[in-house]
Image (cartoon, rainbow, N blue to C red):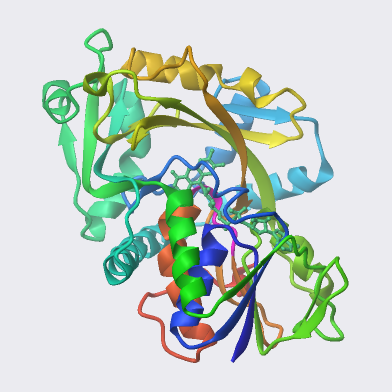
């Protein structure tokens, strides 16, 4: 089967690897000059079901908009636009839906499956990338823990393990936590992990190429046409017909399928990471740590500390360096002196493609031969390998190993 993959972020690359290993003749089209240069460039690195967040829960949209309007550092918006007002309305409807918990359940299930697939791929191809085991949620106050409780209850219902800790127990597992900072409690997810997304994507691309996948960078694909949806046309003038086309173009996916009558209700939600060299190993985290109040994560990958967070809607004209004071604050609260923040710090603004119900679209688009693996929001790295295997199974006409209930486009 001749199969095109559009987009070479972590989702496109893992999809290409799975399709090539299923025996497809794969061509990957990427508009950038290399792979994993957009949303997959500098993620927080968190993997596993523990900290999955579907972004739908009763009352959450109102709380979020309130934070944006009242200038909370965790959330921001820049200018009103019809597109995002209608998205917010859909989000509110999805959050108030009695089955909102099923979304989070689907996400946790996919994350768990993805972890299994990732470790299988890592072993099968002998891939070596920066990674560490264990993540911890830190709750400054009791109300932070209460906020996460529904998520924890669902993990318990589905047999996922975690452990609630008091501060003394938490400090034993994460000794570098600042003594100056008091907190209420922590939750330890021993099976979750941290890994370098871009490094993995580069290695996965190498393996996919060895299996025959043809990566064509600098090739921007034009919106698919209803007359010939499986013919991929590029801005540079090339045109090629495929048996299947898999859309993995992140936030750009919706414009690729808009003429096919396929509507993807995604919104660009920007976020930031800052990466800085480790100053003293002894002061650096050994686990991936998430501050529950600020939704800011801190993790060590290799010789760097990466801090990640903030949800921002609209076009922010300020340079990224001026928007990350919250990330510095949270880093200094928990791990003062861990990073060389006075030296060169890489500050990155990335764009998550978030759907109105907070979970991705995985499966057939409804147009023959056109498939969707997109809308991964905040968890695309964590869910990449499982989503890729599932879509490759579907495109190849095999049954999926994971239950994808609630993840098809027909839900919209
Ligand atoms: C601040 C931040 C922190 C994050 N932290 C985490 C984390 O800790 N864990 C986690 O799991 N996830 C995290 N994420 C989310 C994760 O980064 C994304 O979900 C994931 O990278 C999405 O991958 P993707 O391949 O779908 O999109 P992208 O990486 O954006 O890839 C899409 C690709 O498609 C290409 N493309 C688009 N249009 C076309 C076209 N017309 N023709 C050809 N090519 C095209 C683009 O150039 C791009 O390379 C984070 C995101 C942000 C912003």
In depth, the one of 262 and 211 nearer the eye is: 211
Image quarter where the N terminus lies is: bottom right
Q: Is residue 143 left or right of residue 262?
A: left
Residue 157 coordinates in the image, percent (x, y):
24, 58
In depth, the one of 334 and 23 nearer the eye is: 23
Q: Is residue 145 left or right of residue 199?
A: left
Residue 371, quarter of the rendered image: bottom right
Residue 209 coordinates in the image, percent (x, y):
51, 72
In depth, the one of 151 and 117 nearer the eye is: 117
Residue 216 is a magenta residue: no
Residue 367 coordinates in the image, percent (x, y):
71, 83
Q: Is residue 323 visible?
A: yes
| Residue sticking out furthest to the front | 210
Name the residue located 70 percent from the left edge and 30 percent from the top edge.
77
Residue 195 coordinates in the image, percent (x, y):
36, 47
Q: Is residue 100 visible?
A: no
Residue 269, quarter of the rendered image: top right
The vertical placement of 135 against 392, above or below, is: above
Name the residue located 31 percent from the left edge and 64 percent from the top edge.
122
Q: Is residue 306 left or right of residue 374?
A: left
Residue 114, quarter of the rendered image: bottom left
Q: Is residue 54 left or right of residue 33?
A: left
Name the residue located 31 percent from the left edge and 20 percent from the top edge.
141
- Figure disc tally: 0
Image quarter where the C terminus lies is: bottom right
Q: Which residues are magenta?
A: 374-378
The vertical placement of 326 against 409, above or below, is: above
């Amino acid at each position: 089967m001749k199969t095109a993959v559009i987009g070479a972020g972590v989702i496109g690359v893992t999809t290409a690897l799975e399709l090539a290993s299923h025996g497809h003749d794969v061509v990957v089209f990427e508009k950038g000059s290399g792979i994993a240069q957009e949303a997959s460039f500098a993620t927080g690195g968190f993997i596993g079901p523990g900290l999955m967040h579907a972004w739908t829960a009763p009352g959450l949209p109102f709380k979020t908009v309130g934070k944006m309007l009242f200038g909370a550092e965790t959330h921001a918006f820049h200018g009103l636009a019809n597109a995002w007002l209608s998205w917010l309305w859909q989000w509110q409807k999805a959050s108030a839906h009695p089955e909102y918990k099923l979304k989070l359940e689907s996400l946790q299930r996919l994350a768990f499956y993805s972890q299994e697939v990732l470790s299988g791929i890592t072993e099968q191809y002998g891939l070596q990338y920066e990674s560490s085991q264990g993540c911890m949620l830190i709750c400054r106050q009791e109300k932070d823990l209460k906020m996460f409780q529904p998520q924890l209850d669902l993990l318990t219902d589905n047999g996922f393990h975690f452990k609630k800790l008091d501060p003394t127990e938490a400090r034993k597992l994460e000794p570098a936590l600042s003594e100056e900072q008091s907190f209420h409690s922590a939750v330890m997810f021993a099976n979750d992990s941290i890994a370098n997304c871009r490094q993995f994507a580069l290695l996965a691309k190498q393996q996919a190429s060895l299996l025959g996948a043809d990566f064509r960078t600098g090739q921007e694909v034009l919106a698919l046409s209803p007359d010939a949806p499986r013919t991929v046309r590029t801005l540079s003038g090339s045109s090629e017909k495929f048996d299947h086309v898999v859309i993995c173009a992140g936030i750009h996916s919706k414009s690729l399928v808009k003429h096919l009558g396929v509507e993807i209700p995604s919104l660009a939600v920007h976020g930031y990471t800052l990466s800085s060299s480790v100053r003293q190993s002894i002061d650096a985290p050994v686990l991936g740590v998430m501050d529950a109040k600020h939704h800011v994560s801190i993790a060590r990958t290799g010789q760097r500390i990466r801090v990640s967070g903030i949800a921002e809607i609209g076009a922010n004209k300020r340079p990224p360096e001026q928007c990350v004071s919250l990330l510095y604050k949270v880093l200094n609260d928990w791990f003062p002196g861990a990073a060389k923040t006075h030296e060169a710090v890489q500050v990155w603004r990335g764009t998550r493609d978030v759907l109105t119900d907070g979970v991705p679209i995985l499966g057939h688009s409804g147009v023959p031969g056109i498939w969707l693996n997109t809308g991964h929001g905040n968890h695309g790295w964590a869910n990449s390998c499982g989503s890729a295997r599932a879509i490759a199974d579907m495109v190849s006409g095999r049954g999926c190993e994971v239950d994808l209930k609630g993840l098809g486009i027909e839900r919209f």
